Image: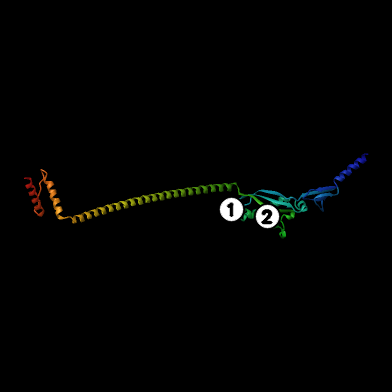
Amino acid sequence: MFIIITLIILLLIVGIFSFTIIPPNSEGQLVRFGKPLDKTLESGFHFKAPWDRALKVSLAQRTTHLNDLAPITKDNAMLQVDASLTYHVSDARKFLYANDDPLETMDSIVNAYLRGEIGRRDMAECTSDVTEINKALLQYLQDGGANGHSITAQFGIKVDFANIDRINPNEKIQESMDKKIAADNETSAAIITAEGQKKVKLTNANAEKEMQAIVNEKELAQAINAAKMTETEATANANAIRIENEAFADVNPKYLQNRQIDSYNHLADGENNTVIVPSDALGSDIATYTALQASDAK
């Protein structure tokens, strides 16, 4: 009975270790007593010898991050670079046996390439040419190996995408750059303020100039109007005098003599008035008139 139970247990153990299941999108490699067998297992159910071991490798795409890389630019500026690689296992056998640590090797390859690629550029070019560096890195990893093959194919990896996540100067350089940027901003602000004040002063000066021009134009217009009014009044007075002179020219001399006699008559009415009678013809007329008035009074 004991023997039967033991045999059953052994059969169960043998049965359990006599098959393996490879997950989807994966491959398996059989190892017998430490030696890999030349057989690749696809995803699914497989029988094997109980003493064989199946090593499973996922073929799914994955991402690895390379942080704190420190390449130096052409102008001797040390940068802090973080990169990420998206890859998949293209050959499970090579991935398991061709390299002791494929991911570490790939990180070293990327680091060495970035040192050379960034070392050919100055800091300004590195920060502005990130897209070009990404393209160059991916092309190198995919076509930089022997005969134009993938440089990572030798250890069973195919890189699908490469990206520089961060590329910045180190802390000391960044601090110096920040100070320079702050100084440049202050200088720009001072220049802008000075230009603004200059524009305000020019605007005010132009406004005052325009106002003064308006005032001068107004005063000039007033002076012109006053001159025109004076000219008009003078013309009117001249015309009045001319008309009056023309009127006197047409008056009968006898009328003027009568007016003069009447004036002398009014002057003679006063008690203290002294009348001087001329000796010309008008005086004779006045004398005659005076005599007639005296006879009338008697």
Judging by the rendered image, the residue that carries numbered circle 1 is 124
- The three-letter code of the residue at mark 1 reads Ala
Q: Quadrant of residue 129?
A: bottom right
Q: Is residue 146 left or right of residue 271?
A: right
Residue in the foreground of this view, choosing between 235 and 144: 235
The residue nearer to you, when weighing 22 against 153, is 22
Mark closest to the chain's N terminus, 2 or 1: 1
Q: Identify which residue is drawn at 37% across, 50% down.
A: 214
Check disc 2 and report its element: helix, strand or loop. Answer: helix
- Mark 2 sits on what residue? 138
Q: Position of residue 69 (x, y in %)?
A: 65, 49
Residue 87 at least partly seen = yes
Q: Label 1 neighbourhood size at 10 Å, few (<14), some (14-19), many (20+)? A: few
- Distance (Cα) linking label 2 and label 1: 22 Å
* Crowding at mark 2 (Cα within 10 Å: few <14, some 14-19, many 20+): some
The furthest residue to the right: 1
Q: Residue at x 46, y 48 (%)?
A: 196
Give the x, y percent position of residue 158. Answer: 72, 54
| Image quadrant occupied by the N terminus | top right
User: Is 6 situated left or right of 183 in this image?
Assistant: right
Residue at (39%, 51%) from the top-left corner?
Answer: 210
